[in-house]
Amino acid sequence: MAKVTSHIGKERYKIEVTSPSGNTLISDEPVSDGGQNKGVSPTELLAASLAACTSVTLRMYADRKGWDLEEMTIDVELNRNDETNKTVIKRKIHLKGNLDETQRARLLQIANSCPVHKILSNPIEIETQMV
């Protein structure tokens, strides 16, 4: 189970997000949306979650297999269309290392199995209560 707490005070749109492990990050809106651009936007955080999860999942798998994956870069673009009520997420995986086509194909399968990918590509239910 993942759990975070966010807090916003009077400073316009600056949000502190903390985890039970004591890690903190700052989220904010860009200046064009009335924020101060002191951190990544909430939508960027969602895209970052997919990028980070994909990265760690592929690193773990390649390390376990002993494959020569030197480094990778994951680009995630999230576009929301309010008119069609559809969100399209585009993920590009750049791999560097001595990998054959079979290994690369397997890593693509593994990328599609990362936990955040599974969350985002299956039904989501959000339960909210005011306290």
Image: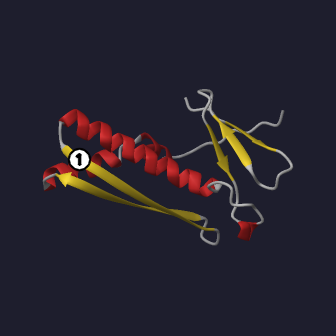
Q: Is residue 48 above or below residue 84?
A: above
Q: Is residue 54 above or below residue 73?
A: above
Residue depicted at 73% across the width and 39% down the height: 128
Closer-to-camera residue (102/60): 60
Q: Quadrant of the C terminus?
A: top right
Residue 38 on image: x %, y %:
68, 56
The residue lying furthest to the right in this view is 10
Closer-to-camera residue (96/128): 96
Residue 129 on image: x %, y %:
78, 36
* Mark 1 lies on residue: 69
Residue depicted at 60% across the width and 34% down the height: 23
Q: Quadrant of residue 18?
A: top right
Name the side, left or right, on which 7 lies relative to 51.
right
Q: Amino acid at mark 1?
A: Leu
Name the side, left or right, on which 80 lies relative to 12.
left
Counting other residues with Cα less than 10 Å from the Cα at mark 1, is it few (<14), some (14-19), or many (20 or more)?
some
Q: Is residue 121 visible?
A: no
Residue 93 on image: x %, y %:
33, 57
